[in-house]
Image: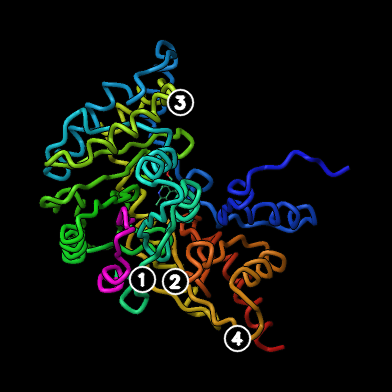
Amino acid sequence: MPSKIKASERCKNLKSPIRDVVYLAKEVQKTGKKIYFFNIGDPNKFDFDTPEHMKEALKKSVESHNYYSESEGDEELIEAIVYEENKKNNISITNEDVIITNGISEGLHFLLNAIIEPGRGDEILLPGPTYPVYLQATEFAGGIPVTYKLDEERNWEIDVDDLRRKINVKTKLICIINPNNPTGSVTNKKIIKEILDTAAEFEIPVVSDEIYDKLIFDDIEYRNVASLANNVPVIILNGFSKNYLAPGWRCGYIYFYDENNELKEIKEAIKAQARQRLSACTPIMKACVKAFEDKYHLYEANKKLKERANFAYKKLNQIPNISTKKPSGAYYIFPKINLNGIWKSDEEFVKDVLINTGIVFVHGSGFDPIYGKDHFRSVILPPISLMEEAFNKLENFMKEKVRR
Ligand code: PLP
């Protein structure tokens, strides 16, 4: 009997391209096919692991830190974050500027809910392509995601003219993801300055997601957005999932760099939401205090990522109808497909690849229907031998398709 109890439209419309594809992958797996899960940016599913000193710290912290923390976050961790961010970026934030969240994901929802007034037509400017949660969370909060172009021809550099053209009175926030997911591109200082100048002119705050800021394996100068801000209020998102190889710990943070206190209400609105969910996970926060003490794992991680990015770049470019730029940071590569009349869309391509080869990619239009179209995303996290095995299957599949 059909149920009269209906879910809300906004929940029914929620999509997770990176995870939704797993349902089909599980079906294909049942047929006995080997599945290559190249869809999720989780290093620990491959040969990476959370640093030992953090795991040891967690074992100790569960002995005695199993209470609710302050809603804004554990004070000791806030202090460690303030010290780390100030030192790394030569900025001066204080404890009051930081809120710890259950991953950036929670912080992003808090931020968008704090800024967007549903029904008012508020627009959030996002990179195109973008990490899909930004698109979904903006709509869920009652806003309209508007994407600005990342120019593939210029190695996915932000097209500041396009960003500027898309600003209007309804624009509430300009978002940057640097290094970018899904393209692996790193935004340089000059472009960040141009964006900050534009934001200053239109009096719009800038949010920068810097969750991959220590995972840059090319020789590129990286600059934190707060360190370049001059009279523009800036919000930074960061966390322990990627740089510290601890995605399952669900620990992230937001901080404000806001010399003139223009974001006072937004900060309060985020703190009010943090109180509603009581606290982030206390033993995890206590263990994260130790994270910054030893960063040796980053050397190893970046070395592997560089080799794997180089391999993926070379190999994918040898496959007919696929071409790609080389990532400089993060965990991903974002190749272009020539659909060649064989597939109707990138989504259909990704499904066909999965069913025939067992490789799980994510369709590009899930990262943006405009600038992600006709692309797909793969992680560059697997060991080269595993990537080689999978990409050889992809190559054979593509050759066969073209021949037919
Ligand atoms: N931001 C970006 C750009 C990401 O790529 C991801 C995960 O892939 C997240 C945020 C999620 O971060 P967290 O694990 O801290 O929720």
Do labels 1 and 4 touch, CB within 8 Å?
no
In this view, 109 is above or below 328: above
Do labels 2 and 1 touch, CB within 8 Å?
yes
Instruction: Point out the stretch of residues depicted in magenta.
Output: 159-177
> Of helix, strand and loop, which one carries label 2?
loop
Q: Is residue 399 left or right of residue 45?
A: right
Question: Which of disc 4 and disc 1 is earlier in sequence?
Answer: 1
- Label 4 belongs to which residue? 340
Q: CA distance from mark 2 to mark 4?
A: 18 Å
Going by the numbered disc 3, the residue's amino acid type is Arg
Badge 3: residue crowd in 10 Å (few <14, some 14–19, many ≥20): few
Query: In percent of the image, x 63 and y 70: which residue is there?
Result: 393
Q: CA distance from mark 3 to mark 4?
A: 49 Å
Q: Nearer the viewer, residue 177 or 146?
A: 146
Going by the numbered disc 1, the residue's amino acid type is Lys
Dot label at residue 149: 1
Image quadrant occupied by the N terminus: top right
Q: CA distance from mark 2 to mark 1?
A: 7 Å
Question: Which of disc 3 and disc 1 is earlier in sequence?
Answer: 1
Do labels 2 and 3 touch, CB within 8 Å?
no
- Label 3 belongs to which residue? 277
- Label 2 belongs to which residue? 371
> How far across and down, in percent of the image, does residue 77 sit?
28, 26
Q: Is residue 334 left or right of residue 344?
A: left
Quadrant location of residue 111? top left
Residue at the extreme top of the image, as rendered:
64
> Of helix, strand and loop, which one carries label 1?
strand
